[in-house]
Image (cartoon, helix red, strand yellow):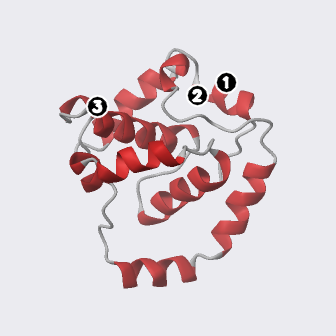
Amino acid sequence: MTLQEALRKHYLLNPQFTPRGDYKGDNAKKLVNAHDISHLVFGCDTSLLGEMRVQLWAKFAVQKFSFKESLIYARDKEAKVLLKNPVGYLAMVVFFIKHFSEIARVRRQAQLMPAKWVCFNEDAYMTMPVGAIRRRFGIVVI
């Protein structure tokens, strides 16, 4: 299944998620697209644990944004909504403590990757099978 087909299926299985095209601003579109594709490339479901893993993969296995890029997304009103914590900070801290071992698991796998995933460059991979992308980047689904 290509990345484009997987993304289409992702939205069919998760109608509660807003597809990239429904956002007004380019920054929000880019951010939601990169996040949703990260779920697929790194093999993370949409549970709270899956969301935690996506964030960990982003920390350890994705090429870092520049400070300027980070500011652009932090200042964008529509993008800010995407970055909101849906369960509350205390619940999130408790959840992270309970699943602390995930940090080491994802970090170990990320260190084995020959190259880091580059967000916002997904269009180059849309016609490629997800398995081929994972092989290319050395991604092992946890």
- Report the Cα–Cα distance between label 2 and label 1: 5 Å
Pick the residue in front: 74 or 98. Answer: 74
Residue 26's label in the rendered image is: 3
* Proximity of marks 2 and 1: CB atoms separated by less than 8 Å: yes
In the figure, is residue 40 to the left or right of 84? right
| Label 1, residues with CA under 10 Å away: few <14, some 14-19, many ≥20 | some
Pick the residue in front: 50 or 57. Answer: 57
Q: Amino acid at mark 3?
A: Asp
- Report the Cα–Cα distance between label 3 and label 2: 25 Å
| Label 2, residues with CA under 10 Å away: few <14, some 14-19, many ≥20 | many
Is tag 1's residue or tag 3's residue first in the polypeptide sequence? 3
The quarter of the picture where the C terminus appears is bottom right
Pick the residue in front: 81 or 106. Answer: 81
Q: Is residue 16 visible?
A: no
Q: Which residue is mark 2?
A: 130
Residue 36: x, y in percent?
41, 41
Residue 9: x, y in percent?
37, 31
